[in-house]
Amino acid sequence: MTDVRLKLSPPWVTYVNEIKALFEDDKDVRVTYDNDKVEINIYVEEFRKARAIEEILPISKQFGKVELKIYVIPANVDENGDLSKCTYGQIFDAAFKGNPAYSFSVDIDSVFTNVLTYVVFTNKVVQFFNDNLNDVYGNMSTLYQEIASDVFETKGNVFYCTDVKKDLSSERQWP
């Protein structure tokens, strides 16, 4: 008999899975989800990193009648958490410090518009179980840049991209 799955993950569970995927390999971050309360708790070791994550994530996300609450909980509080003079690139650098999913960011002053920020993620396919009926394993396969575009709330000209393959990195021409 074939295993037939007819249940799909609700959109807030997909959102939770995306956040978990972004921080899954970050040794300083632990993400938990409480389905009964419909809330995510993101535990962060370093205060500045916690503040940066708080800056780029919403405090809640609405999915129809369901509201997902998002809490960023630092392990400690210190004086080094002020991000008010940071560019978006610097905020992402702080949020993803030590995270292998992240490559780098670039802030570019533009003549035609405000600063352009490119947030570059590792060149890797990300997979997580998501009751995906289009996949034989029920997984969702995507890139970190797609997850970031879905998850983060940024203002201004922020673009999410994927780093080039390691064997092409010497050919990087722009910016």
Image: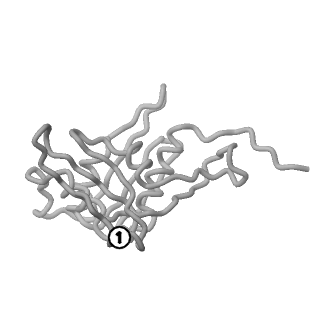
Within the image, what quadrant is residue 48 found in? bottom left
Measured from the top left, where is residue 47 in percent x and y?
22, 62
Q: Nearer the viewer, residue 83 or 124?
A: 124
Furthest-top residue in this view: 65
Which quadrant would residue 8 be assigned to in this image? top right
Does residue 33 appear to the left or right of 175 in the view shown? right
Q: Amino acid at mark 1?
A: Ser
Q: Which residue is mark 1?
A: 169
Q: Position of residue 5 (x, y in %)?
A: 75, 43
Number of other residues with Cα within 10 Å of mark 1, as a class: few under 14, some 14 to 19, many 20 or more: few
Quadrant of the drawing holding the C terminus: bottom left
Residue at 21 percent of width and 55 percent of height: 89
Residue drawn at x 51%, y 51% as measured from the top left:
17
Task: Look at the numbered disc 1 and give the secondary structure of its residue.
Answer: helix
What residue is at 26 percent from the left and 45 percent from the top? 158
Q: Nearer the viewer, residue 12 or 149?
A: 149
Q: Nearer the viewer, residue 47 or 103?
A: 103
Q: x, y percentage for residue 66? A: 48, 31
Q: Where is 102 relative to 15, above or below?
A: below
Horizontal and vertical percent for residue 70? Answer: 37, 45
The residue sitting at 34% across, 48% down in the picture is 71
Q: Quadrant of residue 174?
A: bottom left
* Apparent side of residue 158 relative to residue 67 in the rendered image (left or right): left
